[in-house]
Image (tube, rainbow, N blue to C red):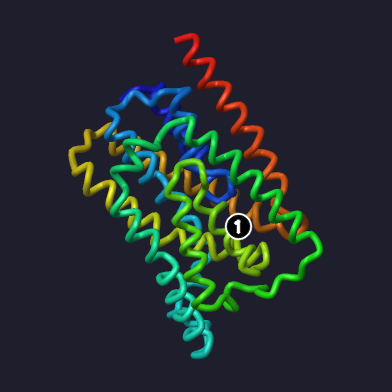
Amino acid sequence: MNFVEILKVIVLGIVEGFTEWLPISSTGHMILVDEIIHLNQPSDFKNMFLVVIQLGAILAVVVLYFDKLNPFSRGKKPAQKQATLVLWSKIVLACIPAAVIGFLVDDILEEDLMNGYVVAATLIIYGVLFLVIENRNQYKSFEVKKTADISYQTALSIGLFQLLSLIPGTSRSGATILGAMILGCSRAASAEFSFFLGIPIMFGASFLKIIKYGLNFTGSQVFYLLLGMVIAFVVSVYAIRFLMEYIRHHDFKFFGYYRIVLGAVVFLYFIITALVG
């Protein structure tokens, strides 16, 4: 087991934990960070690691929202339990488009789009979209205030927006939050529903990656994977709380500007690297 590799895994876990929930693309950041620190593992393992590490982040949502998402909570009245089951049915419905299409195009995306140039372009494009949408919403009153108020039709439409996140650098949370706000959901409802959508999507994506990779892990690889997940979990708890508190008082424009600046820096980095190389 290599101490330097352990430090790299810790860095990747921290990056995943922060960026999974902020609308700035966790996969994009993970690809870019790996370009710089170069996790010294086979490419197949790295591709699987960059997806499966997100399970740690997803578990943070399960822990923080356990009571809200648990239809069998003892403290809930029958009507509340029924409402929770309805919420889950909307979550599952919204996940169907990405689950089906993602399964069909996973190999294509991995081979052709997992690179810095695609990440840079999508960072900038969706950064601009955040600014446009937030400017449009500046004086607008949102029709949907809470996740419980999201209709089945709106849930499915948000799921269709989630398809955009199959392109690296888009951000799953970014695509679903943008889509939800376009459809009339408040920032808080959009963010929460985006969190909830991540649970079945990321469990499914991780399961698919592990099956494709096989169970041919070395002892050190198992350790790296578990360590990355634990770090991502701890950091995600903070990141989720930060985002929900932040959007109570602010809009998403900061993240739009961040994406545009980061995308420009990434373009320059890869262009310079190509010229020097």
Q: Residue at x 61, y 68 (%)?
A: 183
The answer to whether residue 219 is above or below residue 176 is above
Q: Nearer the viewer, residue 122 or 3?
A: 122
Q: Residue at x 40, y 28 (%)?
A: 6
Q: Quadrant of the C terminus?
A: top left
Q: Is residue 224 left or right of residue 277?
A: left
Q: Is residue 173 left or right of residue 93?
A: right
The answer to whether residue 223 is above or below residue 238 is above
Q: Classify residue 203 by image quadrant.
A: bottom left
Label 1 is placed on what type of residue? Answer: Leu
Task: Give coordinates of residue 75: x percent, y percent.
Answer: 52, 82
Q: Residue at x 31, y 47 (%)?
A: 106
* Crowdedness near tag 1: few (<14), some (14–19) or many (≥20) residues, C-alpha within 10 Å: many
Q: Classify residue 93 by image quadrant.
A: bottom left
What is the residue that sits farthest to the top in this orientation? Answer: 276
Task: Give coordinates of residue 92: x percent, y percent.
Answer: 40, 70
Q: Nearer the viewer, residue 147 or 9?
A: 147
Q: Quadrant of the N terminus?
A: top left
Which residue was labeled with disc 1? 178
What is the residue that sits farthest to the right in this orientation? Answer: 139
Q: Classify residue 146 by image quadrant.
A: bottom right
Circle 1 — which element? helix
